[in-house]
Image (spheres, helix red, strand yellow):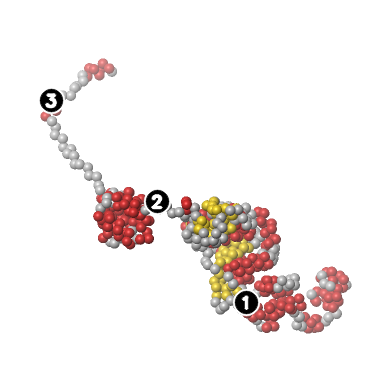
C-alpha cells in the first residue's frame, strides 16, 4: 500500500484523489507520503498490540490452548460465545489474530494437522431436493480420567447446508436410526425428496449387484415415508461429501476438547452449537449462512410425517414399552396387546383426555384405551390383552398323542419332551399339533424311533425327520408295469375265411 501511495503521488494525484482511489483515510495517506522507505519498514516490523476488546479473555483462551493445543480459532470463538454471554461483537478474523498472537507469545504449537481430502465441486441441487446422512464416532474425555465413546447421526440439507446432529452412548441400530430421522425431520420442519446414504450395516444387508437388500425395519420405514432412499456405491464417499465434511466439522469443532456429562447434556449443547456455529455462521463453500438459507428451503420440503407431527405436539408423549407389555404412566401400569413389545426400544404414543388415556403405535394407529387410575402401583389391564390359555398343556398333550396313534413310544417321547423342555412344552405341543397331520402314521413312528435313539426331544426335529422319511419313501416307490406276451398264436379258424374280391368290370363302368 505504501508503494501504491507513492506511485499515485508521482503521477500527480493529490491526497484526496489517492484517498478515494485506494479507499484510505486522508490521514493515512498523509502519513505514508511523509515516510521514507526505511522508516516505513521499521514501522511495520514493530510488535503489534493485542486487540483491546478481547484482552479480558486472554487467560481463558491461554488456558484452553494449553489444555487443548489442537483447538482451532473457530472452536475458540464458539467456546467464548458459549461461556460468555457478554462477549463483544467482533469479526472472526479478530478472534483468529487474537488466538494466533497468544500461540506465538507462549509458543503453543497446534501440532500436526490432518491432511484434508479433496472433493470435486458439484452443481448445487434445488431447494428441498436432497439431504445426506452419515454416522460418526468419537472418544470424549469424562470428568475423571476415563474416556467415553459416543455415537452420532448427522443429516445435512444439501442446498442450504442446514445440519442436524443427534448423539447417543450406544451404537445405532435400525430402530434408533429411524428415531434419529424423525428428530431430524422435526428440526428441519419437513423431509427432503431424496436422502443419500452410505452402505451402512444398520440400513442395508447386501448390495446384491444393485438390487439393494435393506434391513427389515428400515425398509418398512422407507415404505411409509415420502422420501426416496438413495445409496452410494461402496468406497464412494465423494457421492455424499457434504455430510462427510459435516461429520468432521462436528468432531473437530464441537466435540474436540469437550467433557462428556451424559447424553442429555451433550444433545442440549449440540443444539446450542448448531444455533451459534453449525448453522449460524457463514458456510465457507456457499458463502451464506445455513440457517438463513433454510428459511427459504423449508417451504420446498415435503410435509412432516404423521408420527413426527405427533411427537412435535405436546398432546402426544412417547413412552417405552416394558417387556411384560405394559407402560408406566403416573406410577401405574397399563397393559398393551400381546405382540406390541418388539425389543428394548419399543415405544408408543400416549394421549390423555380427561379420565381416559389412549395408546397409539408409531403410525398413530390406536392400540388400546384405559380409564385413568388415581391410585399408585395399580396394574390396569384389558381382558383382551391376556394370553390365550384356553388350551391347557394336558389337552394339547392328549391331542398330540392321539395323532401319534397313542403308542407306548409316543407317550415316552411326550414324557421326555416335557422333562427336557419344561419352559417350551406349550410351544412344542402347538407345533406338533399343527404339523403332524401332514405325515402318515408309519413315518411318524419312524421319526419317534429316531428321536428316542438319538436323545432328540424337539418338535421341529421330529417333524423334519418324519418329512425326510416320507420323501425318501416316495422316491423309492416306483410303479412297475406287468409284463405282456406279444406273441399271439394264429387261430386255425382264420384259414376258413377268404377276403372278398371286386370285379374289374365294376370299375370300368364307373370310368
Q: Look at the numbered discs 2 and 1 and tell me whether their residues touch, using CB distance below 8 Å.
A: no
Residue at x-position 68% and y-position 83%: 106
Quarter holding the C terminus? top left
Query: What's the CA distance linking mark 2 and mark 1?
Result: 69 Å
Mark 2 and mark 3 lie on one chain; the one further toward the N terminus is 2
On residue 125, the disc is none
**Would you say residue 239 is visible in this rendering?**
no
Helix, strand or loop at label 2? It is loop
Residue at x-position 20% and y-position 41%: 482
Residue at x-position 67% and y-position 67%: 277
Mark 3 and mark 1 lie on one chain; the one further toward the N terminus is 1
Q: Look at the numbered discs 3 and 1 and tell me whether their residues touch, using CB distance below 8 Å.
A: no
Which residue in the protein does label 1 denote? Answer: 70
Q: Quadrant of residue 15?
A: bottom right
Helix, strand or loop at label 1? It is loop
On residue 496, the disc is 3
| Label 1 Cα neighbours within 10 Å, binned few <14 / some 14-19 / many ≥20 | some
Residue in the foreground of this view, choosing between 125 and 350: 350
Toward the top, the furthest residue is 509
On residue 390, the disc is 2
Toward the front, the furthest residue is 375
Q: Quadrant of residue 283?
A: bottom right
Q: Position of residue 114 (x, y in %)?
A: 59, 74
Numbered disc total: 3
Amino acid at each position: 500500500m505504501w508503494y501504491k501511495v507513492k506511485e499515485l503521488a508521482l503521477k500527480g494525484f493529490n491526497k484526496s484523489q489517492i484517498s478515494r482511489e485506494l479507499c484510505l483515510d486522508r490521514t493515512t495517506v498523509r502519513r505514508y507520503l511523509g515516510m521514507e522507505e526505511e522508516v516505513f519498514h521499521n514501522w511495520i516490523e514493530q510488535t503489534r498490540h493485542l486487540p483491546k476488546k478481547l484482552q479480558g479473555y486472554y487467560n481463558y483462551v491461554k488456558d484452553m490452548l494449553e489444555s487443548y493445543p489442537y483447538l482451532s480459532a473457530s472452536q475458540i470463538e464458539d467456546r467464548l460465545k458459549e461461556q460468555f454471554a457478554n462477549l463483544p461483537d467482533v469479526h472472526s478474523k479478530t478472534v483468529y489474530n487474537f488466538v494466533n498472537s497468544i500461540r506465538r507469545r507462549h509458543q503453543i504449537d497446534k501440532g500436526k494437522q490432518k491432511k484434508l481430502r479433496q472433493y470435486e465441486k458439484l452443481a448445487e441441487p434445488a431447494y428441498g431436493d436432497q439431504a445426506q446422512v452419515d454416522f460418526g464416532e468419537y472418544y470424549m474425555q469424562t470428568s475423571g480420567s476415563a474416556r467415553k465413546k459416543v455415537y452420532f447421526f448427522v443429516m445435512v440439507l444439501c442446498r442450504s447446508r442446514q445440519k442436524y446432529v443427534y448423539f447417543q452412548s450406544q451404537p445405532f441400530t435400525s430402530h434408533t436410526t429411524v428415531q434419529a430421522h424423525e428428530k431430524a425431520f422435526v428440526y428441519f420442519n419437513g423431509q427432503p425428496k431424496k436422502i443419500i446414504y452410505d452402505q451402512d450395516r444398520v440400513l442395508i444387508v447386501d448390495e446384491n449387484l444393485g438390487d439393494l437388500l435393506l434391513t427389515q425395519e428400515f425398509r418398512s420405514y422407507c415404505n411409509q415415508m415420502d422420501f426416496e432412499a438413495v445409496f452410494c456405491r461402496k468406497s464412494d464417499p465423494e457421492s455424499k461429501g457434504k455430510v462427510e465434511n459435516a461429520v468432521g466439522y462436528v468432531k473437530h469443532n464441537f466435540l474436540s476438547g469437550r467433557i462428556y456429562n451424559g447424553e442429555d447434556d451433550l444433545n442440549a449443547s449440540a443444539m446450542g452449537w448448531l444455533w451459534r456455529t453449525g448453522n449460524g455462521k457463514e458456510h465457507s463453500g456457499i458463502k451464506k449462512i445455513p440457517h438463513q438459507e433454510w428459511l427459504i428451503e423449508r417451504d420446498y420440503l415435503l410435509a412432516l410425517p404423521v408420527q413426527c407431527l405427533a411427537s412435535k405436539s405436546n398432546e402426544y408423549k412417547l413412552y417405552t414399552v416394558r417387556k411384560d407389555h405394559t407402560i408406566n404412566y403416573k406410577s401405574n401400569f397399563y397393559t398393551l396387546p400381546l405382540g406390541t413389545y418388539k425389543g428394548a426400544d419399543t415405544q408408543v404414543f400416549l394421549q390423555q383426555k380427561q379420565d381416559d388415556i389412549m395408546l397409539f403405535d408409531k403410525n398413530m394407529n390406536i392400540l388400546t384405551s384405559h380409564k385413568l387410575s388415581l391410585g399408585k402401583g395399580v396394574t390396569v389391564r384389558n381382558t383382551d390383552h391376556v394370553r390365550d390359555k384356553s388350551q391347557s398343556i394336558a389337552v394339547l398333550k392328549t391331542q398330540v398323542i392321539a395323532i401319534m396313534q397313542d403308542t407306548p413310544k409316543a407317550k415316552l417321547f411326550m414324557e421326555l419332551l416335557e422333562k427336557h423342555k419344561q419352559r417350551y412344552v406349550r410351544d412344542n405341543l402347538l407345533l406338533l399339533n399343527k404339523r403332524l397331520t401332514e405325515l402318515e402314521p408309519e413315518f411318524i413312528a419312524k421319526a419317534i424311533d429316531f428321536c428316542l435313539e438319538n436323545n432328540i426331544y424337539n418338535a421341529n426335529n421330529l417333524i423334519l425327520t418324519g418329512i425326510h422319511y416320507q420323501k425318501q419313501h416316495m422316491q423309492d416307490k416306483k410303479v412297475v408295469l406287468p409284463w405282456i406276451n406279444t406273441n399271439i398264436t394264429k387261430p386255425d379258424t382264420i384259414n376258413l375265411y377268404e377276403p372278398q374280391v371286386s370285379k374289374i368290370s365294376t370299375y370300368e363302368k364307373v370310368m
